[in-house]
Image: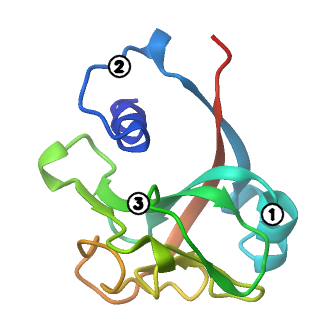
Amino acid sequence: MDHIYQIVHWIDKNQGEVSLKLVPYEFKLLLRGSRDGFGIDTFGKRCYNKRATLIIIKLKDDDKIIGGYNPLSWRGASKYLSTNDSFIFSFQSTLNLSSTVLSRVKNGKNAIYDSAYDKHGFGDGDLRIFDKVCDLKEYEKRIIKNDSFEIEDYEVFQIVKKNT
């Protein structure tokens, strides 16, 4: 649950305390790889045209979780999308905040790559979901040491602002 608080802080770009009652978002599960499938077609059917999505990837044979936040909509347009509000991250699945990496986009022009095929991701390969690539180009920091990774499971959530 502490990871949820951390992600809320990153979305809101603040450092204050957030209690469970005051989390201003609902996290709607759109896709779970182990339940719905890992294919690009499944991603398209469940995630296209959904604004503000959070992708969380559990790495295979590792206790690390990586992911990214896209405040825009995935559409399969085969072009870069501009935003200064996206980010990618990594942390241990156990609560170990010292190992947490937050990486914000440096230049919003190439923040998100909205592919029609298998290159959906953040930046120019900073985190690509379906090719399993993780490099350093458009974002501030590398989120893992390796250039590639294997997925044990992944989830996509739509982040919806709660009515107050």
Residue 89: x, y in percent?
A: 35, 60
- Amino acid at the residue labelled 1: Tyr
Residue 102 appears in which quarter of the rendering?
bottom left
- Amino acid at the residue labelled 2: Val
Q: Left of 119 or right of it: where is 5? A: left
Q: Left of 18 or right of it: where is 114? A: right
Q: Say whether marks 3 and 1 touch (CB < 8 Å).
A: no
**Residue under circle 3?**
87
Callout 1: SS: loop
Image disc number at residue 48: 1
Please name the residue shown 35% across and 19% down the image: 18
**Residue 64 visible to an observer of this rendering:** no
Residue 66: x, y in percent?
A: 40, 63
Q: How far apart, in angstroms, are the residues tagged by discs 3 and 1? A: 19 Å
Is 50 in front, or is 67? 50
Please name the residue shown 46% across and 13% down the image: 22
Residue 63: x, y in percent?
A: 32, 59
Callout 2: SS: loop
Callout 3: SS: strand
Is 101 in front, or is 51? 51
- Which quarter of the rendered picture does the C terminus lie within? top right
Please name the residue shown 62% across and 52% down the image: 53
Residue furthest out toward the left: 98
Q: How far apart, in angstroms, are the residues tagged by discs 2 and 3? A: 20 Å
**Residue under circle 2?**
18
Q: Quick one: label 3, few (<14), some, or many (20+) residues within 10 Å? A: many
